[in-house]
Image (spheres, helix red, strand yellow):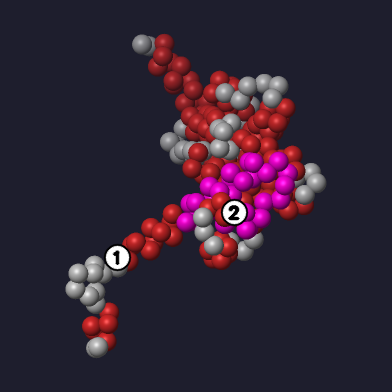
Amino acid sequence: MSETEGTEATEGTPAARPHTGRRRNEAAHRAILDAALRLLAESDGTPVTIDAIARAAGVGKQTVYRWWPSKGAVLLDALTDRAGQDVSGPDTGDLRADLRAFVSTTFEAAQRDTTAPALRTVAREAARDPHLADLMRSFTATRRTALRELLTRGRERGELSADADPDLIADQVYGVFWYRFLLGHGPLDAGTAERLADSLLTGNAGGNAEANTAAKTEGKRGR
């Protein structure tokens, strides 16, 4: 059989489509992330292993290691992937609207049944498990970076004062979130998100933000 004949489909057998393997890889990747998040939520402090993740995802252990070097890397990717899907990082050119949307979706997404148990497990067990503590620090750092970028864009547009500290504002946003998420003493709803965003921007407003607010107020009066 010639080399050409060996690479062609035989009669009646369709040639393999290159994108079929890609779809299969994407499905396995998604199954692993979903399984890792589910196992973390159900673990109640019991260590989640690569073997358990592979079994739950219906793949071989080597398939997991193809993409991640350790279970911590899988769990971190699962958390950040879910947060990236659920929490919008808007860039409408209006810092107040963007911050309200970011905080509101952060609050709402963290309380979903698919996410809340995993976050509570990591937060609870991080105090006694160094690996989960590292995972928690890495995860929160990615979320702080997303918020800091949003705030920095607003400062560059003049909607935050030049001396406003994006890191301190991010601490205040996530301080409220974690305090209420873990203790449950107050709501994490859209109204809370809006009031929090407004109070933070009022104390750090730049000239453009004040002008925009005044213009909007004047426009409402003229209707």
Which quadrant, please, contains the C terminus? Answer: top left
Which quadrant, please, contains the N terminus? Answer: bottom left
Q: Which residues are magenta?
A: 28-54
Q: Which SS type dominates the magenta stretch?
A: helix
The type of residue carrying mark 1 is Arg
Sort mark 1 into few (<14), some (14-19) or many (20+) by Cα contacts within 10 Å. Answer: few
Judging from the image, what secondary structure is the residue with disc 1 in? loop
- According to the picture, the residue beneath numbered tag 2 turns out to be 53
Where is residue 70 shown, x and y percent of the image? Answer: 64, 61
Q: Quick check: 97 left or right of 135?
A: left
- In depth, the one of 32 and 179 nearer the eye is 32
Where is residue 118 shown, x and y percent of the image? Answer: 63, 40
- In depth, the one of 69 and 89 nearer the eye is 69
Where is residue 166 shown, x and y percent of the image? Answer: 63, 40
- Residue at mark 2 to residue at mark 1: CA–CA distance: 29 Å
- In depth, the one of 220 and 20 nearer the eye is 20
Judging from the image, what secondary structure is the residue with disc 2 in? helix
73 falls in the magenta region = no
Q: Residue at x 55, y 30 (%)?
A: 108
In the rendered image, the residue lying farthest to the left is 11
Up the image or down, 164 lies above or below 62; here it is: above
Where is residue 174 shown, x and y percent of the image? Answer: 66, 35
- In depth, the one of 26 and 43 nearer the eye is 43
Q: Quick check: 7 left or right of 60?
A: left
Q: Residue at x 55, y 42 (%)?
A: 83
Is tag 2's residue or tag 1's residue first in the polypeptide sequence? Answer: 1
Up the image or down, 128 lies above or below 2; here it is: above
The type of residue carrying mark 2 is Ile
Q: Quick check: 11 left or right of 26?
A: left
- According to the picture, the residue beneath numbered tag 1 turns out to be 17
